[in-house]
Image (spheres, rainbow, N blue to C red):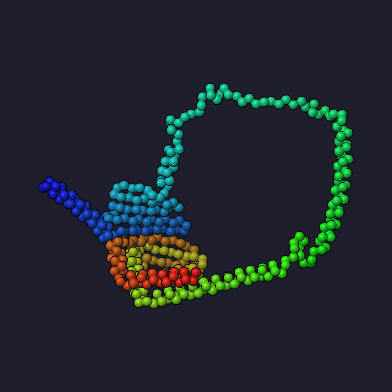
C-alpha cells in the first residue's frame, strides 16, 4: 500500500511540475513584448527594406529583406536558422527535384540484340506492270462516245424540268399574302393574342418581383434602424470603439526616425502630401523631417520604425469587452431580428 501511495505521489508531483512549467511559459509569452523593427531606404527607383521581428532576448527571431528586386526571409530559433523565402529555398527545391528524377542503379536497360535484332518485318510486295495499264483496248473508244451522247441528253431534260419547276414556284409565291416572308405562314389571331398575353405576364412578373424586393429591403432597413437605436447596441459600440483605440495604441510604433525629401511633377499630389504631413506633424516632429521640393523631381528617403506588441495587454482589453453584459444582449437582439426576418420570408413564400 505504501508503495502504491508513493507511486501516486510521484506521478502527482510530475504532473504538477509540468503544469507549472506550462503556466510559466504562458506567462512569459503574455508578458514579454514582441519587438519589431522596419528599416528602409529609397533613392530614385532603388528600394531596399528590412523587417525584423524578435522575441525573448532575440532567442526567437524572423527577418525579411528586400534588395535588388529580390526577397529573402528566414526564421531563427536559438542558433538554428531556416530560410523560408528567397533564392536559397528555390535552389534546394531544384536539387531535391533533380535527385528524385535521377534513374536508380537497379533500373532495367534496353533489351538484348538477340531479342530485337533477329526479328524482321515481312511485308508483301505488289508488282505492277505499268506497260499493261497504259495500253488501251480497242473497244474503249466506242463506249466513251456513247456515254457522252447519253450525258448530253440528260442535261437537256434537266434544264427543261428546272424551267417548269421555277414557273410553279412563282405561282405559289404569288398566292402568299403581302408582308409575310416566303416560306412562313401568317400567324392566326389566336396565336397573336397568346403572344401578347405572354409578354404582358412577363412584364407584370418582373414589376411585382422588383416591388417585393423593394419592400423587403425597406423592412430590413427599418429593423436595422431599430436595432441600432437600442441602448445595449449603442453601449456595445462605444466599448468596441474604446477597444480599437487601445489596441492601436498598443500596436503603433513608439520610435520613428529618418528623413524624406519629395518632389513631384504633379502639384495636386504634392499638395495632398503636404496636407497629410501637416496633419500628423505632432507625431513625428521631433524625430522625422519631411522636406517638399516644388522645382525638382526627387524621391529620397531613409527611415527606421520600431515598436513592440504585448499580448497580455491586448488580452486584458479583450477580457474587459467580453465581460460586458450589453454585448450578449445585443447578440440576442440580433439573433431575434434574424429569426423574425426568416419567418416573414417563409410566410410570404
Residue 278 image-quadrant placement: bottom left
Q: Residue furthest left?
A: 2
Q: Position of residue 236 (x, y in %)?
A: 34, 72
Q: Position of residue 13 (x, y in %)?
A: 17, 51
Q: Nearer the viewer, residue 8 or 265?
A: 8
The furthest residue to the front = 190
Q: Is residue 40 above or below residue 328?
A: above
As drawn, 270 above or below 12: below
Answer left or right for 6 relative to 286. Answer: left
Residue 227: x %, y % from top left: 40, 74
**Snapshot quadrant of residue 200:** bottom right
Is residue 43 visible to the viewer in this orientation of the structure? Answer: yes
Q: What's the residue at 44%, 42% (across, down)?
A: 94
Q: Is residue 171 above or below residue 79?
A: below
Say whether residue 28 is visible: no
Image point (42%, 72%), residue name: 340
Residue 16 x/y as whole percent: 19, 53
Specify the quadrant of the image occupied by residue 174.
Answer: bottom right
In terms of depth relative to the viewer, which is nearer, 254 or 78? 78
Left or right position of 6 against 260: left
**How many circles with numbers are drawn on the protein?**
0
Q: Nearer the viewer, residue 286 or 209?
A: 209
Q: Quick check: 272 left or right of 127? A: left
Q: Residue at x 48, y 75 (%)?
A: 218
**Image side of residue 44 versus residue 168, left or right:** left
Residue in the image at 41% along x and 64% along y = 260
Amino acid at each position: 500500500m505504501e508503495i502504491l501511495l508513493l507511486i501516486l505521489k510521484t506521478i502527482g508531483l510530475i504532473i504538477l511540475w509540468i503544469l507549472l512549467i506550462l503556466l510559466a511559459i504562458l506567462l512569459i509569452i503574455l508578458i514579454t513584448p514582441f519587438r519589431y523593427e522596419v528599416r528602409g531606404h529609397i533613392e530614385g527607383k532603388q528600394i531596399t527594406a528590412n523587417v525584423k521581428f524578435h522575441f525573448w532576448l532575440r532567442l526567437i527571431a524572423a527577418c525579411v529583406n528586400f534588395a535588388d528586386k529580390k526577397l529573402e526571409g528566414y526564421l531563427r530559433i536559438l542558433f538554428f536558422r531556416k530560410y523560408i523565402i528567397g533564392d536559397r529555398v528555390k535552389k534546394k527545391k531544384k536539387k531535391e527535384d533533380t535527385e528524385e528524377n535521377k534513374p536508380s542503379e537497379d533500373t532495367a536497360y534496353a533489351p538484348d540484340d538477340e531479342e530485337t535484332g533477329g526479328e524482321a518485318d515481312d511485308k508483301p510486295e505488289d508488282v505492277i506492270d505499268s506497260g499493261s495499264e497504259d495500253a488501251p483496248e480497242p473497244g474503249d473508244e466506242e463506249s466513251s462516245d456513247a456515254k457522252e451522247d447519253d450525258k448530253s441528253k440528260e442535261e437537256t431534260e434537266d434544264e427543261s424540268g428546272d424551267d417548269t419547276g421555277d414557273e410553279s414556284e412563282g405561282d405559289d409565291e404569288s398566292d402568299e399574302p403581302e408582308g409575310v416572308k416566303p416560306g412562313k405562314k401568317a400567324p392566326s389571331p389566336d396565336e397573336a393574342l397568346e403572344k401578347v398575353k405572354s409578354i404582358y405576364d412577363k412584364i407584370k412578373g418582373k414589376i411585382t418581383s422588383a416591388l417585393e424586393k423593394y419592400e423587403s429591403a425597406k423592412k430590413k432597413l427599418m429593423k436595422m434602424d431599430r436595432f441600432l437605436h437600442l441602448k445595449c447596441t449603442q453601449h456595445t459600440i462605444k466599448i468596441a470603439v474604446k477597444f480599437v483605440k487601445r489596441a492601436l495604441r498598443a500596436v503603433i510604433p513608439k520610435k520613428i526616425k529618418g528623413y524624406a525629401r519629395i518632389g513631384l511633377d504633379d502639384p495636386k499630389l504634392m499638395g495632398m502630401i503636404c496636407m497629410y504631413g501637416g496633419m500628423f506633424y505632432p507625431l513625428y516632429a521631433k524625430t522625422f523631417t519631411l522636406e517638399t521640393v516644388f522645382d525638382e523631381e526627387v524621391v529620397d528617403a531613409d527611415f527606421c520604425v520600431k515598436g513592440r506588441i504585448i499580448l497580455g495587454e491586448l488580452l486584458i482589453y479583450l477580457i474587459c469587452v467580453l465581460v460586458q453584459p450589453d454585448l450578449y444582449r445585443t447578440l440576442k437582439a440580433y439573433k431575434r431580428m434574424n429569426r423574425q426576418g426568416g419567418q416573414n420570408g417563409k410566410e410570404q413564400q
